[in-house]
């Protein structure tokens, strides 16, 4: 039990199947409410399994609210509208595009100033008493359920007073004028019979896959047993929730009081020994490079983990990032880029599912002086700073910092990443890694094909950094 009522409990969700189990558990044990807020909710296998658990919760009387950004909802109005026919389910779409058909792609181009502003928050809240905050959206690639690329990601399973703050943040977005009920947004006609069809289809899908290798893995997972036996080893600590106010998306409301960045900055400024950062999209800009330079001049050790060209899922971001690598290395920042094969060695030894042939970093976290840990949805790039809304938790805990630092060290090992350096003769980049039992040094972007390299070159010529 927690001896301090002001402290909250935290459990690190670094394993993708554990992250799925935790969400499934929160939906399955909810008694009163489920509040679900995401940037992306796919309709793939894991998305449908969670939808079945959420619908089952609503059937037993749980009040469900789903808030999802509109960026990836093309063609799905009828499904969401049918679900909202349930007496216990409400669905709102954040910053909806006016066009609900293929014209939405044109709207994204001609109305980019508005359509490019997105809700990037991720939160899964059960009974206002337990919540999951972090980098994962809802989709197979976040839960090791894809056969191709799966993400390396990180969430915090949280209980205690911090959940009250997470619920308040959800309500701020739910009540915002940016959140539109699906019923008033879409002209698609649905009837309650469609809800019965959805329930039947999800139930059939559930029973069809319940005996699959993936679900056998879930049943045997260590976290499953901890949840069943109510023995999750939460770390109790003081913590603060930071989140952007929804008004951040208003073009005429850019004052810093509605951004969470300035509120986190004092933690970074006060770091006196070490800063560890993981960000899949890392575009520090000139001001960021200057900040890193000043920190390094004060003998503060800085390590940054991001994607390599071979692992990034957005090559435009790599085009923005690559121009800063040389200067960062000169200033003393240690840069690490994830390897495509990282999933295989990062998986637990007893895991039954096969690792993906390709990994991609999606975790967003920082560790400051081995004491403070920040985990959330924000990347270190202009988009997270200026265009997206974000959320995250700062935890004051040496124990959690130790666990997170161990994760960072495993991921940045030469087995799982490339360590960048500069050739002393001509200042060109070198990538050091470990392969087949020995060290290997690359002189160009490792394991990246010609088309990727060409795409990055072309994109690097365009003035798009503010959109990355």
Image (tube, rainbow, N blue to C red):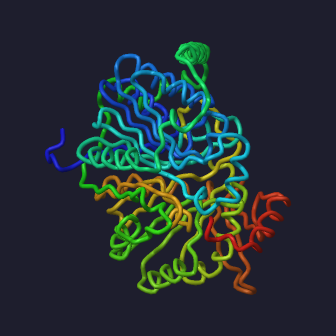
- In this rendering, position of residue 172 left or right of residue 161: right
Q: Say if residue 413 shows up in the picture.
A: no
Closer-to-camera residue (409/214): 214
Residue at 51% over, 42% down: 93
The image shows residue 13, relative to residue 240, as above or below, that is: above
Choose top left, top right, bottom left or bottom right for residue 150.
top right
Residue at 29% over, 37% down: 128
Closer-to-camera residue (437/169): 169
Residue at 69% over, 51% down: 340
- In this rendering, position of residue 348 left or right of residue 78: left
The image shows residue 310, relative to residue 431, as above or below, that is: above
For the C terminus, give its image quadrant. Answer: bottom right
The image shows residue 192, relative to residue 34, as above or below, that is: above
- In this rendering, position of residue 344 left or right of residue 84: right
Residue 99 x %, y %: 65, 45
Residue 58 x %, y %: 40, 22
Choose top left, top right, bottom left or bottom right for residue 140.
top right
Tag count in the figure?
0
Residue 348 x %, y %: 52, 39
| Furthest-right residue in this view | 450
For the N terminus, give its image quadrant. Answer: top left
Residue 406 x %, y %: 44, 54
Q: Say if residue 278 shows up in the picture.
A: yes
Choose top left, top right, bottom left or bottom right for residue 124.
top left
Residue at 59% over, 13% down: 204
- In this rendering, position of residue 5 left or right of residue 118: left
């Amino acid at each position: 039990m927690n001896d301090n009522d002001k402290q909250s409990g935290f459990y690190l969700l670094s394993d993708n199947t554990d992250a799925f189990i935790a969400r499934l558990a929160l939906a399955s044990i909810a008694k009163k409410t489920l509040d679900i807020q995401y940037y992306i909710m796919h309709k793939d296998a894991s998305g449908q399994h969670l939808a079945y658990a959420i619908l089952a919760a609503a059937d037993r009387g749980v009040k469900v609210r789903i808030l999802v950004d509109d960026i990836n909802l093309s063609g799905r109005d009828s499904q969401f509208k049918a679900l909202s026919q349930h007496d216990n389910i409400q669905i709102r779409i954040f910053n909806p595009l006016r066009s609900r058909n293929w014209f939405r792609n044109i709207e994204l181009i001609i109305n980019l100033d508005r359509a490019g502003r997105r809700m990037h928050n991720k939160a899964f809240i059960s009974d206002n008493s337990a919540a999951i905050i972090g980098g994962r959206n809802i989709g197979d690639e976040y839960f090791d359920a894809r056969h191709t690329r799966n993400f390396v990601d990180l969430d915090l399973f949280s209980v205690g007073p911090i959940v009250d703050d997470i619920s308040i943040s959800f309500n701020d977005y739910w009540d915002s004028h940016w959140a539109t009920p699906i019923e008033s947004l879409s002209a698609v006609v649905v009837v309650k019979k469609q809800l019965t069809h959805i329930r039947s289809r999800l139930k059939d899908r559930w029973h069809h896959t319940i005996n699959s290798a993936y679900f056998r893995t879930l049943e045997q997972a260590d976290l499953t047993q901890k949840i069943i036996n109510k023995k999750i080893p939460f770390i109790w600590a003081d913590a603060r929730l930071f989140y952007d106010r929804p008004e951040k998306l208003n073009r005429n409301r850019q004052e810093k009081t509605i951004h969470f960045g300035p509120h986190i900055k004092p933690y970074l400024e006060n770091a006196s020994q070490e800063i560890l950062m993981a960000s899949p999209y890392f575009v520090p800009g000139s001001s960021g490079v200057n900040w890193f330079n000043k920190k390094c001049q004060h003998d503060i050790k800085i390590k940054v983990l991001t994607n390599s060209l071979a692992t990034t899922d957005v090559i435009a971001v790599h085009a923005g990032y690559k121009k800063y690598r040389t200067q960062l290395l000169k200033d003393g920042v240690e840069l690490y880029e994830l390897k495509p094969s990282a999933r295989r060695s990062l998986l637990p030894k007893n895991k039954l599912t096969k690792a993906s042939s390709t990994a991609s970093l999606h975790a967003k976290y920082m560790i400051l002086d081995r004491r403070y840990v920040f985990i959330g949805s924000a990347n270190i790039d202009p988009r997270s700073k200026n265009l997206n809304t974000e959320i995250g938790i700062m935890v004051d805990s040496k124990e959690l910092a130790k666990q997170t630092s161990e994760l960072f060290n495993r991921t940045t090992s030469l087995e799982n990443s490339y360590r960048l350096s500069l050739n002393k003769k001509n200042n060109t980049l070198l990538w050091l890694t470990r392969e087949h039992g020995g060290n290997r040094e690359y002189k160009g972007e490792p394991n990246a094909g010609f088309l990727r390299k060409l795409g990055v070159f072309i994109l690097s010529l365009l003035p798009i950094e503010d959109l990355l």
